[in-house]
Image: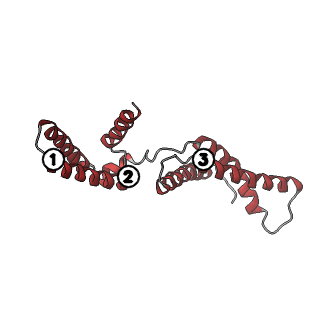
Amino acid sequence: EKYSFAQKEAAKHVEEGRLTLAEKAALVEMNEKRIETLMNEKSTASVAEKLKKALARKQQLSSLTSEVLSVASSTYPPPLRYESQLNTLRKKLLPLQALEEKSKGRLLTLGETRSLTEKGELEEEIERLEIASCGWFEEEEAFHERLQKSRERFDSKHSRAKRGGGGGGG
């Protein structure tokens, strides 16, 4: 049951073009090996049907151009497991980072020192949640791509809010 579910979900990703270029290359290679194996088997009705399906998949994969994949990849890779909590913590971290930048070269008040202590704790919690967001069978490269995309989404939202906020200081 789990196997068939995973197979259906994978097929859905391919049909919708929700693949990276590396995933597409891997699928094309797997499909080529499948076709080669089927060509070497004895010719039967079931083999012919499987070969027909494999050739149709090959055609479908070749129709996925880099443009189609890049459009589909605007929502792909999927968000991190703890992305909402990460974004909340990142928002709390922004004023603390600004405080740290402003306070360079001067003595801090007691409140500022406490705030900067909290900054270290927030950064540790962010790192912990980022690591916990990695999937069990997720390759490190794919995870880092998702993590980078998450950070970029947050930064783009933050930079827009900062620009639109009016007379911001520095």
Horizontal side, residue 152 vs residue 107: left or right: left
* Residue denoted by label 2: 20
- The residue most toward the right is 110
Kind of residue indicated by mark 3: Ala
Q: Which mark is residue 132?
A: 3
Question: Which callout, 1 or 3, points at the residue further toward the start of the chain?
Answer: 1
**Label 2 close to label 3 by CB (< 8 Å):** no
Q: Nearer the viewer, residue 64 or 3?
A: 3
- Residue in the picture at 48% in, 49% down: 138
Say which of marks 1 and 3 sits in front: 1
> Are circles 1 and 3 on residues that touch, CB within 8 Å?
no
| Percent of width and height locating residue 125 | 69, 49
Q: Residue at x 38, y 36 (%)?
A: 3
Q: Is residue 14 left or right of residue 45?
A: right
Q: Using the numbered discs, state the Cα–Cα distance from disc 2 to disc 3 in whole angstroms.
A: 23 Å
Q: CA distance from mark 1 to mark 3?
A: 45 Å
Residue behind mark 1:
41
Residue drawn at (23%, 49%), measured in percent from left and top?
34
Question: Which residue is situated farthest in the top direction here?
Answer: 1
Q: Secondary structure at mark 2?
A: loop
User: Which picture quadrant has residue 108?
Assistant: bottom right
* Residue 4 position by quadrant: top left
Characterize the local packing of mark 1: few (<14), some (14-19) or many (20 or more) Cα atoms within 10 angstroms.
few
Task: Give coordinates of residue 117: x percent, y percent.
Answer: 80, 55
Where the C terminus falls, by quadrant?
A: bottom right
- State the SS at label 1: loop
Three-letter code for the amino acid on which mark 2 is drawn? Thr
Which residue is farthest front? 42
Closer to the chain start, of discs 2 and 3, is 2
